[in-house]
Image: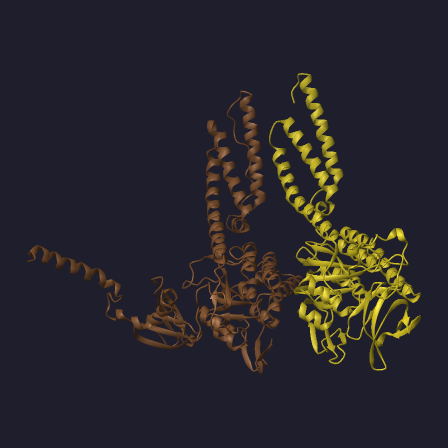
Amino acid sequence: MKNLIRNALVCTIVGCIAAAALGGEAVQIRLNDGSRWRGEISDYVELKILQQGIEVVFQGRMVAAAAYHVTIEGDIAGETRRKTVFKNDILSIRTIQAQEAGVVESDPARPNRPAGAVKKATPDDRTPGVFVLPLKGQVGTEIRYNEIEMIGEEADKYGTGQIIILLIDTNGGLVLEEELIIEAIVDIKKRHRVVAWIQKAISAGCATAMVCDEIYMMTEGTAGSVTTIRGLQHVPEEEAQEGIDFLVEVAKMAGHSEHVARCMKLKKFLCSYDKDPQTGEVTFYGDLSGEFILSDEEHNLTFNSSEALHCGFSDGTADTGEDLAKLLDLPRWHEKSDYGRKIADRWYRTVERANDEIPRLMARMDYWKTSGSAQERIGALISIYQDLIKWIDRAPNVTRFRLPEKEYFQRQIAELRKQLADLKKAQRGGGRY
Amino acid sequence: MKSPRAAWLRIAFAAVVVALLAPSTGLARDDDDVSTEDILHMVDGRELHGRILSESKTQIVFEIIDLKLHMKSRRTFRLDEIAHIERGVEVETAAKPKESIRTRESSDEPEQPRYGRARPSSDAQNLPGLYLVPMKGQMGTDIHPDVYREMVDDIRRLNPDYLVLELQCQDTEDRLYTRWGEEERGFDSSTFLDSYRELVNLFRDELRDIPQVMWVHDSQGISSVIAMAWDELYMKPAARLGGIADVRKNFNVSDEEVYAKFREAYMAWLKGFAEYGGYSLELIDAMVLPEFTLSASFKGREVVWALNDRGEFLVDDDDENTVDFRAKDAEDLAISDGTVETLDDLAFLLGYREYRVIEGEAEEIFDRYVKSWRRNSDNCKTWWADYQQHRGWASGDETLKWLGRAKIDVEKIIRAIDRYEAVKIRLQTELGLRRFDLVTIVEQLREQIRSLRQQQRGGRGGGGVGRGGTGVGR
């Protein structure tokens, strides 16, 4: 399974590189101040560029992007012309509407997309905004890949290049689910900008954050401690190696240091870094030779917001939506849809009910195994087993380590029905049970 | 002419008056030195009144007399804790400073400004208004986001110029300050840290537009970390900030890797609060983990902390103990912004020579909540005892009657738990009662009652009590 996922990830990375080389849709520009712009070819943009030492503002449609330059088509001296701009000369860049660039398009949402695939834009849709998916609770129960896939599909309706914010608040959870979640995020990243906004991203939560395009932390935010454990024992290193390699791959894919990933897994790994005071560029080392030590042999790396920001693990610190909007270069905090919050809440409530009802059903089962008349007992147990089967269908994430397989209960029900039939037969025949 | 009987009555009356007035002078003591006392001026700024019972080269045994509560307690102090001693001070003279403050606050006469500041009546709308937020009692129950969420509307309505959060939480039992026992120790597991984070978010994010100050009356335990979520922090002279070492139980596991994982995650959560207040994260390391040495260097007014002994001032190099701060140390090391005894002093340091205390509902909301959940918690213990007794009586002809009563007892407990998270927490820690167990008991009692009624309708009557009520006591 893991190999399959790794292969999928590798294919994805290769695919992304190939797409970029072939002038594909997604474009990412990292500016000199460390900020990033993400969009796609055919986006309308406003660039502030440095031209012979003078700041010049230029608006137009992005028609091509390469490693070191982008080509913009816009109004130059009264004519529509193309202009090539070196990325190093770009001081700032923001996405704008076609109208702002003085162009009237038939489909204002995304001109190059098939009309049927794009939700008809309302005035509200045109306001730059975000989709928020809260990820709160345990990875594998409250947090599943399903909701992540669903928010991706919801964002698709608004066209590519949407901003999806994963609001992470978790102490971690199942490795198996973590892999599925990462797979889902990697897929969504092909079409949208996926941002992790961390309140608490421990263990599997941190791996989830690391695969995102950008990481922002709340002031009290924490991220790290990704050691794989089984109960209160750590997984032996030879067994854990696969997980370490996986996290390293995830880290590299999102532009994080592999040393950071390793130090979050096992305490024997070391990590330090230097930071260029002029450019802010950070260089990580797998030892303690850097000026700033992140993790020595006694510690498992876990970031607080200030440390994460200093070494570039996070792209900024934001406590409120408005704070985050500024960092995302949005004019204001605007949630385009509450779909993400709704689906997260719906699933969270389901898990809560399951956590409440399943133990109660189990207690009821224990009670009825020794109470009541034979007929009452059989009837009650059949009803309980049926309820448990419903929960297995409805919330498999909650039941998978707590209940036997569905087939077990089905067989039990069949057995009880047989007993009930025999009992009734005996009663009709005047016999005893 | 007055009669001799009237003269005798006057003499008797005078005698009674003298007898009644005598104790009120405060001098009616048995021994010779009743009118004097000894005063210990502690290095942390405290001033303790009482009597020196014995002295040695290293310590003093002192009987502290709390004039307000009329309580005595015996304490032993190391000599290095004491700045100086005043012996044989007249009681009236010694008591005056505290009395004068109280008189001024409660007097109907116009207040005389002290050091140019005053607290006029709360209807003086042109003066800056302070809104006092009580944070007193047990962390996790008394101090819970629920109660503060209720205050937010009132704070918004009154729009104060400053929020003053008054923190008084002592985990460590100290007979001088509290009679609380183990059950009053603050909760510090990761679940509770989430709840404290919610509390801090409420003030520091939702109410971020209102300036806030944390005024620590005393803090021992997890409350000290929460206090550090506020960048503006003042302490009372006798206040402590620390006592966090006990939180280590939350990550105390034998597997080295798992220990490192749990410890770093937990420490990062604690440090998250210090991040809010802008305190050095090294402080949290030294306050929780005894193996850390802590030293400070001074760069102008800034203190640079280091987890080694290379700083200019060595704060702690004891491998056995963690760092705690008394008010004076905290101020000297720029952890607190100042040491203030009264609200007047605090207001003055906040830059208000005159101010008003806004008559909000905070105190009322807080008191109502604390009294109510504690009363409910006590009731629950009674109801649980009732349940056990009624369950025991459920036999013979009265089985149905007492099973019904037992069910009602448990249902009352469930209702109290649903109303107050604090009650749920206390019942779980004190009696090992979980909501799930209680609901199961009710279900089973209901089933037994139904079954008995069915039997009675069928003419069989009576019947024993099936099993039930299991699954509790953890």
Instruction: Identify the residue shown where x is 57% and y is 43%.
Output: B437
Residue A224 place in picture, x, y as percent: 70, 64
Residue A419 place in picture, x, y as percent: 70, 27
Residue B381 in view = yes
Asked whether, in this view, residue A46 is left or right of residue A302, the answer is: right
Q: Is residue B86 above or below residue B209?
A: below
Q: Colour of chain B?
A: brown
Asked whether, in this view, residue A151 is left or right of residue A305, the answer is: right
Q: Quadrant of residue B284?
A: bottom right
Q: Is residue B345 above or below residue B182?
A: below
- Which of the pair A74/B29 is nearer the observer? A74
Q: Which chain is yellow?
A: A
Q: Is the image coloured rainbow, by chain, by secondary structure, or in one colour?
A: by chain
Q: Quadrant of residue B307?
A: bottom right
Asked whether, in this view, residue B336 is left or right of residue B113, the answer is: right
Residue B114 place in picture, x, y as percent: 41, 74
